[in-house]
Image (cartoon, rainbow, N blue to C red):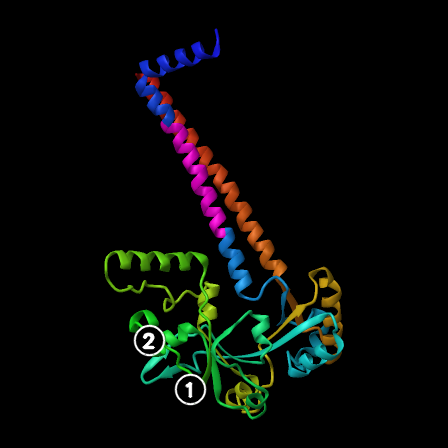
Amino acid sequence: MNLFNAILIGLKDIWSHKFRTLLTMFGIVLGVSSLVAMAAVITGMEKGMKESMIAMGGLDKIRIDDEDVPTWQDHLKNQAPGRLIKDVEALKASAPLITTISPEMRLDWRATRVTRQGRSASTSEIVGVWPAVLDMNLYEVEHGRFFCDLDEEFANSVCVIGTGVRDQLFGSPEEKGTEIVPIGEVLQVGGQPFTIVGMFKHYESEQERKLKELAKKQAKENEGGVKRQRGWSGAKKWGDAFWRKNNVVYMPLNTAWIKFRAASNEDQTPDPRLTDIDIKIADLDLLEPALQQARNVMLVTHNGINDFEFDTQENQINDIRTRIRNMRISQGVIAGLSLLVGGIGIMNIMLAS
């Protein structure tokens, strides 16, 4: 029997059992569709997680966090200084493997609401920063300028905002039909006037960008205006890295300290502690030596009190890998169950017929 005859016999058998053939094809399609769908979901999640990580500063960003003192230093707990500007200056002077240092003084958004003419903005954070934050968090000022040394020295009441804050206080370009650049406008931060001197570019994921392009295309085909989709910039998505980047308010670090933290302790004394110290290193291959340098410097400035820890992006990478691995296992289980259930059902129908 040659190949042609075998194919011919097979086609005749398929034609004579149309219903069984249809059920068999349905089972194959069901299993393959399950695998393809789950693979697409996992790929999308992996890409979204990587985009979010890059949006928040990249793999080489390290955060120095507060940490409870170890048990053997409990007697020194009340002397723990926390993260201070002197730590930043010491790291700049004595840790050559660290290329960028960005101190931050985050304000309580509940006590320092951002408002303008009766409108209120839901911000991701209101922070006093140095210009190094641009390189640290990968920001780009699209309109206006960032802070200068004079703004920091004289604690000027100036701020740089994200496009999400602009949309909430001044209206979005999609609503107004024209670009809105609020440079020179005044808003209130905690009841105090601040002049907007700069605005960051708009940040969005690839999925959001494609959805916007699709909406514009559909609106053009329908000969209507571009309709704003819910969630482009105003929707509150605390877990979305791009939403957080678009809804920040940055002010000079010295301004945040003098205007909001100069008498914030319970006894009305100044609180000089920073909420974040972010660092970047020259080479990820030198991660361990760089962390050891930073640890040695911090132990000196903290008088030997170990009240800090280093949070690297490795933790997030491991978390992403764990999620992806779990999703792939789920993919195999779901696809296997789909094939099993489909196969059992098809076999029963075939036997009954």
> Looking at the image, is 87 positioned above or below residue 338?
below
Observer able to see residue 303: no
Please give the residue where the numbered disc 2 appears in the rendered image.
171
* Residue at the image position 42 percent from the left and 89 percent from the top: 193
Query: In the visual, does 51 lie left or right of 132?
Result: left
Query: Looking at the image, which is closer to me, 73 or 307?
Result: 307
Farthest residue to the top: give it: 1
Residue 347 in picture, x, y percent from top left = 37, 21
- In the image, which disc is placed on residue 29? none
Q: Main secondary structure of the magenta part?
A: helix
Q: Verify whether residue 248 appears in magenta.
A: no
> Looking at the image, is 62 positioned above or below residue 335?
below
> Looking at the image, is 5 positioned above or below residue 158?
above
- Which quarter shows the C terminus? top left
Please give the residue where the numbered disc 1 appears in the rendered image.
184
User: Which dot, 2 or 1, sits closer to the camera?
Assistant: 1
Say which amino acid is labelled 1: Gly
Observer able to see residue 53: yes
Say which amino acid is labelled 2: Gly
Q: Verify whether residue 42 appears in magenta.
A: yes
Q: How many marks?
A: 2
SS for tag 1?
Answer: loop
Query: In the visual, does 90 lie left or right of 55?
Result: right
Earlier-in-chain disc, 2 versus 1:
2
Q: Which residues are magenta?
A: 26-45
Residue 53 in picture, x, y percent from top left = 55, 61
* Residue at the image position 66 percent from the left and 67 percent from the top: 310
Residue 79 in picture, x, y percent from top left = 68, 82
Crowding near the residue tagged with mark 2, few <14, some 14–19, many ≥20 C-alpha atoms within 10 Å: some
> Looking at the image, is 98 positioned above or below residue 340?
below
Query: Looking at the image, which is closer to me, 113 or 216?
Result: 216
* Residue at the image position 36 percent from the left and 60 percent from the top: 212
